[in-house]
Image (spheres, helix red, strand yellow):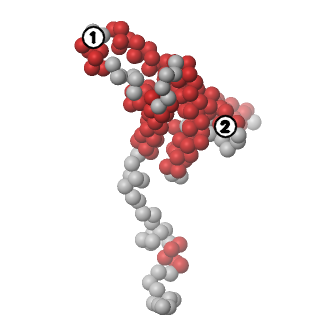
Amino acid sequence: MKKFDKNKSSKTNKDFNDPTSEEFKPKVNWFDRIPYAVKALVLKYWFFGMIYFFFVMGIPNLDMTSETVIVGVALGILNDLVIYKILELFDSYKNESQYYKFFRSKKVYSIFINTVYGFIVGGLSMIFSFVFRYWIQNGTSLEVFDTIKWLFAEPFTFALLALFVDAIFIGIKDLCVYLYRKHISKKEENENYEI
């Protein structure tokens, strides 16, 4: 067995604590170079498509209402228990994941809020999917319909619709938070000015 000799070691504690030393710098791999927005959107797109594939295409003979309820509840529960946690794992010290989550808390009521949110997003996405499918079915000629009849009845386009609806709701939430914080800071500034 080889013994460790302190005198022959080239690395000292000083080297590990020195930010300019080579050992202190974190190693960057290829995944860290991908922008956070790309990682978040691909993750959400994949999960939205997976939900449609397993719960709409995987369970046969469901009517529109049952499909909408199942997709909405599954979307809300997976948002809270899986998607938001993976987004937090991707997160760096900049807290970038807050811009891609609707509501996240460590309390129990978080799952209920996200289930209602998922029900709304999933329901609107399913309704848009049915409406677009109806327009395609009734608004195109028979030759065109035969080539695009699968459109909005498969996971890829549903995931795009769900991502679009999700982005709208998160954008509205972020705008409300921004306006509230701006109002509070203006109010505090006015109070400090009066004193």
State which quadrant residue 134 falls in. top left
Residue 18, relative to residue 178: is it above or below? below
Residue 176, relative to residue 134: is it above or below? below
Residue 57, relative to residue 81: is it above or below? above
Give the x, y percent position of residue 98.
55, 40
12 on left or right of 105: left
State which quadrant residue 73 falls in. top right
Callout 1: few (<14), some (14-19), or many (20+) C-alpha neighbours within 10 Å?
few
Give the x, y percent position of residue 137.
35, 12
Element at badge 2?
A: helix
Front-lying residue, 30 or 61: 61
Q: Amino acid at mark 1?
A: Leu
The residue singled out by tag 1 in the image is 142
Residue lying furthest right: 195
Question: Residue at image x 55%, y 43%?
Answer: 82
Give the x, y percent position of residue 140.
30, 10
The residue singled out by tag 2 in the image is 110
How many marks on residues? 2
State which quadrant residue 36 falls in. top left
111 on left or right of 101: right
Question: Residue at image x 47%, y 90%?
Answer: 2
Question: Residue at image x 62%, y 33%?
Answer: 114
Front-lying residue, 94 or 151: 151
Query: Could you tell me if residue 179 is visible in this image?
Result: no
Q: Earlier in the sequence, mark 2 or mark 1?
A: 2
Question: Residue at image x 35%, y 22%?
Answer: 151
Q: Amino acid at mark 2?
A: Ser
* Residues at marks 2 and 1, CA–CA distance in whole angstroms: 47 Å
Query: Could you tell me if residue 71 is visible in this image?
Result: yes
Residue lying furthest front: 61
